[in-house]
Amino acid sequence: LFCETVLSFILFVVHAVVCKMDVAELEHMVTLLHDSLHRLNWRLKRSSRDRLALDIAALCMGLRPVVMVDYGGKMPQLQEKLCAVLAFLSEGSKIMTSLKVMVISDNAYLIHLYNLQAYMEETLKNAFLLKFVVLDNGTARFALPKEETTVLRHFTCFQEHVCLSLLHDIPAPRVEDLENMSENQNAEVSSVANDIYSCAHSQCLLQNNMLQYSSQKRWLLELGTCDWDTDVLLPTLNGWLLSYPVIYIFNRENISETTHNLSSTSLHQFKVLVVSKCNLPQSGTWELLSFTIPCGLSTLGVEEPWAQTLMRNMRQKIENVPQPVISLELEVTLWTCQTLVI
């Protein structure tokens, strides 16, 4: 609990000193991104380059806490290039100091530190935000309360693992940044800091963990393989981290059967679309995230209560970034008998 409190304080300060991006800043970020790719001689396909720009934009605007980077090359070169890109972008934008490259089981992600921690806390405290679909027995069904509790317990283990890892990686906020904070922000930080530092004094945690480090380590959060005290498979963990309201769960022994059953089932694909006035690679409307659910479990389409909750929460997020984003839309399409990777 103490570690989580210290982490929350550090992330609060980091988040407080970084302003959200407006239209001009987002467009400047895209220019910087193209420059960084050129300097690094990272020859991405145009589709991958555009997707990277949109993924970073979604993180900067607070619309997603995590994005998976399953394009742009193989590991470990991919993580090295992503770290180098964030280092370059941070020279022109303070908000990049809140981003990191996260690696789990040789998979690369970009994360927003503060928003990831806030998202994990929110969904673990409000489990009704998530719908778990069990795929083990041939016919897809919603999870029983006991099954949900088991998965959430493993998610909590992951959150604790992230907290401990971040405490060793997050640097102290710069003095000049703290000086630029508003009086309200300073007052809130001071209030929290008094409690945190008095407790930390006896344990010496803050002093030991706020370290300076090398360029790649500065931007990298390495979490190892997906087997630390959890039986939850990576696709299930990915569903949670990537903000999907519908998350598939299944046993390790049934992966082949599960994939076959799901690929032969009619699915609804839900897409959250962003209508933006930024001059981003895909101006106008672009896809923020997409996920699937068997048709038999989503007969109401966009009127499903969990879908309505998702969009209500997403629209609350864009209230904090009114300039770049005009609106969000939810689109549903039917998939029948496809080869599917979960």
Image: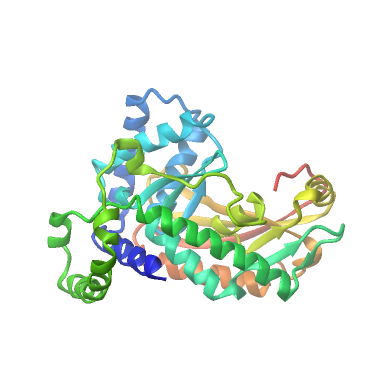
Q: Is residue 301 left or right of residue 181?
A: right
16 in relation to 333, above or below: below
> At 71% from the left edge and 75% from the top edge, which residue is drawn?
145
Would you identify the image quadrant in which residue 246 lies? bottom right
Q: Is any atom of residue 185 visible in this view?
A: yes
Quarter occupied by residue 340: top right
Q: Is residue 283 visible?
A: no
Of residues 151 and 339, the one nearer the viewer is: 151
Please tell me whether residue 53 is drawn above or below residue 316 in the rendered image.
above
Q: Position of residue 1 (x, y in %)?
A: 42, 71
- Relative side of 235 to 7, left or right: right
Which residue is at 27% across, 54% downward? 208
Task: State the scheme by which the image is colored.
Answer: rainbow
Vertical order, 212 against 292 (above or below): above
Q: Residue at x 77, y 68 (%)?
A: 299
Q: Is residue 58 left or right of residue 144?
A: left
Choose between 337 and 178: the one closer to the eye: 178
Can you give x and y, in whole percent of width and height, for residue 41 in the image? 38, 22
